[in-house]
Amino acid sequence: MASYHLEKATNSDDFARRAAETIASYIDLALDQRDRAQIALCGGSTPQLAYSFLGEEHIPWDRVDIFLGDERWVDPLSETSNALMIKRTLLSGGLASKAVFNEVPTIDLPSPKDSAKAYASLIEKTCLGNPPLFDLTVLGLGTDGHTASLFPGTDSLNVKNEWVTVGNGNGMKRITLTEPVLSASRKVIFLVAGSNKKTAIRRLMDPNEPPSRTPGRLVNPTSEILVLADQFASEGL
């Protein structure tokens, strides 16, 4: 069963800076032990300021391989694209622009299933292990308890023999890492912000909560999960 450590930020700026510094520290740790570091990042609105700060952290970014935990099956120039968000924040001309960003192939391929297969192949070529092993995975948490694109009540929750699958949430097709890959990560961090996440974060940390209702609980690495929350999401915890 997963164990959690909760850290509470005092305000939005503190949340973003703590997230950036924490992610950078785990990248540094990985690079102390290995030639390259592989990390998977979440999309959405929550980490945007944190990624802007992270992009200015003084670490050897040319030795870092960046992946996405999930992506919407949309044009890469769509405002809903997680890859576009990463480019506008983390990779927008700062130090982190030297990193290798492995985008999820989307509409250039015939179907979401083809995209999932291509992305899985890319991950297998870059990451060691079976399932592939990320040094760090940064996850978000939806108000409904979803993480990456593993949504409550969907088939993606039950995929165990594939590293990437097709998800479906909020009316959109998505490409997502699966539970085995997320759980294999050396370190997992959840970034949770907003008063509308109060219920979700409590369910995430509740040992009696079923993963079918809160898919974030599917993620079960061997190391302790860090939950970094802002003052609104963590109120009362």
Image (spheres, rainbow, N blue to C red):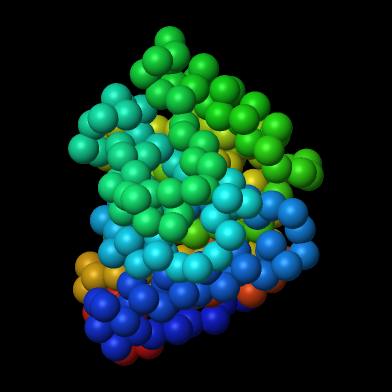
Residue 107, percent from left and from top = 37, 18
Query: Which one is in front, 168 or 24?
Result: 24
The N terminus is located in which quarter? bottom right
The image quadrant of residue 77 is top left
Q: How many marks?
A: 0
Name the residue located 37 percent from the left edge and 40 percent from the top edge. 83
Name the residue located 49 percent from the left edge and 59 percent from the top edge. 138
Residue 187, percent from left and from top = 63, 65
Query: Which one is in front, 161 or 203?
Result: 161
Residue 116, percent from left and from top = 53, 26
User: Along the horizontal axis of the image, is 217 left or right of 123?
Assistant: left
Q: Is residue 4 above or below residue 10?
A: above
The C terminus is located in which quarter? bottom left
As drawn, the residue found furthest toward the top would be 110
Q: Is residue 211 above or below residue 78?
A: below
User: Along the horizontal axis of the image, is 73 left or right of 117?
Assistant: left
Name the residue located 45 percent from the left edge and 41 percent from the top edge. 70
Q: Is residue 66 above or below residue 120?
A: below
Asked if one can make out residue 146 in the rendered structure from this viewpoint, the answer is no
Asked if one can make out residue 30 in the rendered structure from this viewpoint, the answer is yes
Name the residue located 78 percent from the left edge and 44 percent from the top edge. 129
Q: Is residue 126 above or below residue 173?
A: below
Residue 108, percent from left and from top = 40, 15
The image quadrant of residue 7 is bottom left
